[in-house]
Amino acid sequence: MIGPFSYAGSPAQIVFGTGSKNKLAEWIANAGCKRALVLSTPHQRADAEALARDIGPLACGVFAGAVMHTPVDVTEAAMKVVAETRADCVVSLGGGSTTGLGKAIAYRTDLPQIVVPTTYAGSEVTPILGQTEGGRKTTVRDARILPEIVIYDPALTLGLPVSMSVTSGLNAMAHAVEGLYARDRNPISTLMALEGLRAFSRSLPVIVERPDDAGARNEALYGAWLCGTVLGTVGMALHHKICHTLGGSFETPHAETHAVMLPHTAAFNAKAAASELATAADIFGGSIGGGLWDFAKTIGAPLSLKEFGLSQADLDRAASIAVENPYWNPRPIDRDSIRALLQEAWEGRRPVD
Ligand code: NAD
């Protein structure tokens, strides 16, 4: 039975296709802008400088200081450059960290953002910004944060290392899995989630074998758009809460944490959301938790929290934090069940749905 549901399409302009990076100047002009500040991490500085050269007089500078978790002091340093260069838009070239900096600037200035993603994290299509200050992470959701234009050029992902492709892909897939049982899901978010999972189920194994396979890179980035859009549209549940807890309080690596936790949180919710997860379970061989674990193992993803140096005492504390202010979840949670779930993920055992 369909519904009841409410649905609003995203206003973001999506431009997809190999070579679409070459249309950046056109899209800056379409947005009515003349002075773009190009953002990146230090690691991608050379790529950002090359992109700035490509757009010639439309570039007013490069700020290559983006880092993970959008620290407020980095945003403040970037804001000075925005003022000095009189930028009238930002171009974020990179993964979720660079997109986060562009969002933080747009949140403070309402400057238009054009994002050119190079990972599968999905942040570029969400109105959500996570920032850190004094060791605390806060999350804001605001219309100013949603990037106006996203240019997906699969050619830019050809060099994304295989290990990052795998974990970033599983990070995106986690948005889709949680979107399937979201209370505020709608028929379009469900279609996008399933199509995104199919895209990654086909493309990631090929990327592991042949990282420069243009067709697989194309399909994976398509999956990233779909899964990211689900994240930007509907509410997330236990999986995202646990990953935010582990990343926020224990500094575990972002995409890798999602990769390890996804099979376990999916198995945890498998019975409570059996009908919502049925088609996704079919994509992964009939069982959602076990199937996702087998898939993750095949593509060489990290499988245990132990690998991140977490101790048993850390799991005790993480379980307590994860049940404070919990997100809605299809299966009711309590501290003991979350502690047991974390133990399974720490040991890296194949979950039983
Ligand atoms: P990232 O942006 O931190 O990138 C990791 C490293 O890989 C960086 O050094 C980056 O420069 C490099 N890199 C990126 N693309 C590359 C490529 N094609 N080739 C070679 N190197 C490349 O990683 P991420 O996983 O994309 O982003 C993680 C961050 O995004 C976290 O802070 C997370 O909280 C945030 N995030 C936010 C949302 C949201 O909706 N707000 C969604 C997903 C992730």
Image (cartoon, grey):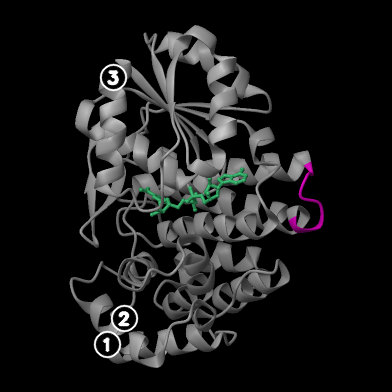
Q: Mark 2 to mark 3: distance in Å?
A: 43 Å
Q: Per the image, is 236 magenta?
A: no
**Tag 1's secondary structure?**
helix
Viewer-proximal residue among 184 and 172: 172
Quarter of the picture containing the N terminus is bottom left
Q: Mark 2 to mark 1: distance in Å?
A: 10 Å
Q: Are marks 2 and 3 in contact (CB under 8 Å)?
A: no
What predominant SS class does the magenta segment belong to? loop
Q: Nearer the viewer, mark 1 or mark 3?
A: 3
Q: Nearer the viewer, mark 2 or mark 1?
A: 2
Vertical side of 101 occupied by 237: above or below: below
Name the mark on residue 318.
2
Q: Tell me what residue is drawn at x 24 percent, y 83 percent.
A: 320
Q: Pointer 1: what residue?
A: 335
Q: Amino acid at mark 2?
A: Ala
**Tag 3's secondary structure?**
helix
Report the span colored magenta: 208-213
Q: Earlier in the sequence, mark 1 or mark 3?
A: 3
Q: Tell me what residue is drawn at x 64 percent, y 63 percent.
A: 283
How many other residues sit within 10 Å of disc 3, few (<14), some (14-19) or many (≥20)? Answer: few
**Tag 2's secondary structure?**
helix
Q: Pointer 3: what residue?
A: 84
The percent position of residue 38, horizontal first and vertical second, equals 45, 26
Q: Amino acid at mark 1?
A: Arg
Viewer-proximal residue among 184 and 290: 290
Q: Amino acid at mark 3?
A: Glu
The percent position of residue 238, horizontal first and vertical second, equals 34, 70
Q: Earlier in the sequence, mark 2 or mark 1?
A: 2
Q: Mark 1 to mark 3: distance in Å?
A: 50 Å
**Quarter-of-image position of residue 64:** top left
**Quarter-of-image position of residue 209:** bottom right
